[in-house]
Image (cartoon, rainbow, N blue to C red):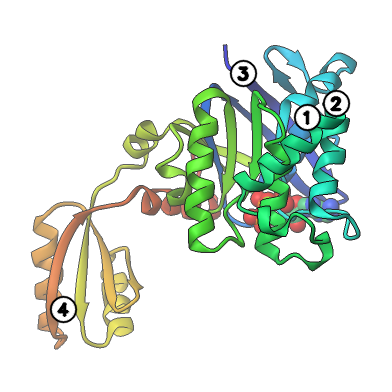
Amino acid sequence: MAVLEVRGLRKRYGRVVAVDGVSFNAGKGVHGLVGPNGAGKTTTLKSIVGLVVPDAGKVLFNGEDLLSPRGWRLRGEIGYVAEVPVLPNDCVAVELLEELALIEGLDKLSARREARRVLEEVGLDRLADRRVKGLSKGERKRLYFAQALLRPRSLYVLDEPFSGLDPEAVAWARSLVSQLGRGATVLLSSHLLREVEELAESVTIIYGGRVLYSGALEELARMAGRGIVAELSVDRLEEAARLLREEGYVAETSGSRLVVRLGSREDAARVVSLLSSRGFMVYESRLRGRSLEEAYLELIARAARGEKVGA
Ligand SMILES: Nc1ncnc2c1ncn2[C@@H]1O[C@H](COP(=O)(O)OP(=O)(O)OP(=O)(O)O)[C@@H](O)[C@H]1O
Ligand SMILES: [Mg+2]
């Protein structure tokens, strides 16, 4: 049985439908919740942790309805890291964590010990005595992480946990997420599939408040059709991309390269000769498999065009 079952979640804010019937399951391990800005990720996650009351739907945690009175008691089992950490400004970092540990039910001595331990774990031990208002954006995010780590949980809900962190902190947070996923269910949201790809075994992709795909990453690769991509180094990049698009190719620029989606390897030669015949200089061409991120972006683009995609 899945640890977490989200069923037919709906939430509207006035006329804006933020979440429009989202359902997915997550078992033990890391499960990605991926979608572009405004897709409904935060609203879904807040509904799970009880910060938003959905208009309809259910969230089952080990078979227990989280919105029922009994379910409320289970909320302590959830470690939550908000997208935008809201923390009391006037508190001293270590005192805030001690206070939260007391609320979690620890005695005074253990609360003090645990507060120090988690501060060290998130790399904030040097800043233990600083007030929250003096902390930088990344430091606040780490502090928010620290409260989620005060005790082991069976479910972690992490809303864009890597955003706002420097590369070293991202590396730390990624290994933490992977470690948490070994013993618990971790819901990890991001607008980049590549950010969750290495960490998650399964993923739910949402767009416009609806689920486009939910399941194993390998299955997504199969469904989206990975295909082949040619990366070309060519002069007058934008013009070349336009020409290929006029000729029916899916072509876009990426940095100093032209990326063209191909049906087969033979297409590569056709693309190069087409460009040459129109006077473009092709300096280099390279074939590679399409990344899962590119497959995901195409899924979103198809949904944006109103095509029926997935569930
Ligand atoms: N409190 C609110 N009042 C009005 N509209 C809201 C509110 N919260 C979210 N929305 C709207 O609901 C939709 C979904 O928002 P949500 O924050 O869930 O998206 P998201 O996927 O987390 O996006 P992002 O990647 O930008 O964080 C958006 O159109 C947003 O503008
Ligand atoms: Mg969000």
Measured in 3D between alpha carbons, the distance from the residue under mark 4 to the one under mark 1, in whole angstroms, is 69 Å
Measured in 3D between alpha carbons, the distance from the residue under mark 4 to the one under mark 2, in whole angstroms, is 72 Å
Q: Nearer the viewer, residue 191 or 214?
A: 191
**Residue 193 vs residue 88: left or right?**
left
Please, what secondary structure does the residue beneath circle 3 have? loop
Q: Nearer the viewer, mark 1 or mark 3?
A: 1
Tag 4–tag 3 contact (CB < 8 Å) = no
Q: Nearer the viewer, mark 4 or mark 2?
A: 2
Q: Earlier in the sequence, mark 2 or mark 3?
A: 3
What's the residue at 22%, 67% (across, down)? 231
| Numbered badge on residue 199 | none
Residue beneath label 1, please?
110
Measured in 3D between alpha carbons, the distance from the residue under mark 4 to the one under mark 3, in whole angstroms, is 53 Å
How would you rate the neighbour count of disc 2 (Cα within 10 Å): few for under 14, some for 14-19, many for 20 or more? few
In the rendered structure, which amino acid carries the disc numbered 1? Ser
The x, y position of residue 207, in whole percent, is 59, 47
Q: Earlier in the sequence, mark 4 or mark 3?
A: 3
Q: Split into 4 quadrants, where in the image is the N terminus?
A: top right
Measured in 3D between alpha carbons, the distance from the residue under mark 2 to the one under mark 3, in whole angstroms, is 29 Å
Q: Earlier in the sequence, mark 4 or mark 1?
A: 1
Does mark 3's beta carbon lie closer than 8 Å to ligand 1?
no
| Numbered badge on residue 3 | 3
Q: Nearer the viewer, mark 4 or mark 1?
A: 1
Q: Quadrant of residue 224?
A: top left
| Numbered badge on residue 107 | 2
Residue beneath label 4, please?
275
